Image (spheres, coloured by chain):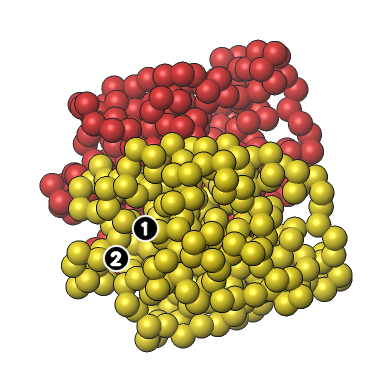
Chain colours: A red, B yellow
């Protein structure tokens, strides 16, 4: 049995939930508020970050990259054509590059600001740093998001999927990150048709359905969030 | 033929140079000043970061994680016992977790500040942001480094090597990061005996020798830097 420690609006956690679903791996969930750094989490991951996954009585697998590789190493062969890691070393490198981009670079420059300021800080008590979003951080995120979208647009305009001709982990990493911004209405979909079409294709997968039904208390999603034909 | 685009004092680049040497893979070097974001680099890696590696006429392999995995996938089997990625999925996950820690978390909280403020800014022209180090950034790095060292100490006190009983990629990732701080005399080695002994063991490997001979113009290394019995 797999247990996943995650938060519903953590982009890296969303990525792992998506690929667990794609790999047909059932899992139990433990909701974690990462800003609380609970003891339960710190025992598993000294870095205090999510997602963390535990299989049976095994050691904690920490972070989206290590969990992705573990999942592919332990289940990839068994799911045949539905595998999300390509076979060729060049294509594997491209997939990993774009997973890193979506969950690290894009997170630091855009998505992390949006999620922290507009979601986490609305849930956090004032004593823990909750409250009004920091408008400087939001300005940074909003200035950066278009540059990233243009680059993703450039990639999917020349490829069928983000990392190449086949659906891969990279598509789910980017969809996980974008879904958080999309919930908040922070993605201008009208500017770039190819990236919009790409997102519509990923969004229509059954693995996305649970995420599209989730809500932040008191903050309804943008109208396009769960709309498959947005 | 492999070509590596790197800077001598970029911790992630040092990591790749170390593991290329450990894997017995010859490579050509191109020195890159990452703050210049040269066109030659941007064509290969839109993120503008180093290290980047190219094999023959193949596509660019970007970033320390993807390069490490590529190297192991294309050469790991051939080097047998000297392989730096363990076989078991749990041990692989632990290795990757600690590589991420050394090159991402440790870099953001400590090493990146030290290298940027005390090395890159000394080399950069004033017009590009060079000059005196930002003392606030150095204060942050110096406040954080002891917490990281304590954690690494805790790990190597209970294991032969950083990620377990065998030498792995994790050891070289941490040694690469620490070597930059050590050049600057920013590591207090006297506090924790086990981590010092661990570093002495890694430092004595032939792969470390080229790094220990490198100097920043006008800034000699700390006295212990190249001393194997420091």
Is B171 positioned to the left or the right of A71 in the image?
right
Decide: marks 2, 1 in contact (CB < 8 A)?
yes
Camera-side residue of A90 and A63:
A63
* Same chain for the residues under marks 2 and 1 in the image: yes
Q: Sort mark 2 into few (<14), some (14-19) or many (20+) by Cα contacts within 10 Å.
A: many
Q: Which residue is mark 2?
A: B72
Residue A63 seen in this snapshot: no
State the image coordinates of residue B215 (x, y, percent, origin top left): 65, 75
Question: Closest to the observer: A12 or B7?
Answer: B7
> Where on the picture, by quarter, is residue B194?
top left
- B132 relative position to A63: left or right: right
Residue under numbered circle 1: B169
In the shown orientation, is residue B147 left or right of residue A134?
left
Q: Residue at x 53, y 72 (%)?
A: B211
Outermost residue, left side: A78
Residue displayed at 15% across by 51% down: A77
- The circle on residue B23 is none
Residue A227 % position (x, y)? 47, 34
Instruction: Say above or below: A176 vs B196.
Output: above
Relative to B151, say whether B134 is above or below.
Answer: below
In this picture, is A193 found above or below B159? Answer: below
Q: Which residue is located at x 34 percent, y 49 percent?
A: B161
Using the image, name the chain to which the residue with label 1 belongs: B
């Amino acid at each position: 049995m797999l247990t996943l420690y995650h938060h519903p609006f953590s982009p890296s956690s969303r990525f792992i939930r998506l690929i667990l679903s794609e790999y047909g791996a059932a899992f139990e969930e433990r909701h974690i508020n990462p800003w609380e750094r609970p003891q339960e989490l710190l025992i598993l991951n000294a870095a205090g970050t999510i997602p963390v996954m535990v299989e049976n009585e095994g050691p904690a697998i920490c972070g989206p990259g290590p969990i992705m590789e573990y999942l592919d190493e332990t289940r990839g062969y068994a799911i045949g054509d539905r595998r999300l890691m390509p076979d060729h070393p060049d294509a594997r490198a491209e997939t990993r590059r774009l997973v890193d981009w979506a969950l690290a670079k894009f997170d630091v420059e855009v998505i992390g600001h949006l999620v922290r300021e507009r979601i986490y800080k609305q849930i956090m008590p004032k004593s823990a740093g909750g409250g009004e979003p920091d408008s400087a951080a939001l300005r940074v995120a909003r200035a950066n998001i278009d540059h990233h979208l243009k680059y993703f647009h450039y990639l999917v305009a020349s490829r069928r999927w983000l990392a190449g001709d086949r659906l891969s982990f990279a598509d789910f990493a980017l969809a996980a990150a974008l879904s958080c911004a999309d919930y908040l209405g922070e993605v201008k979909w009208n500017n770039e048709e190819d990236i919009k079409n790409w997102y519509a294709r990923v969004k229509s997968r059954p693995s996305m359905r649970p995420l599209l039904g989730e809500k932040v208390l008191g903050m309804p999603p943008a109208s396009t969030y769960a709309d498959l034909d947005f």
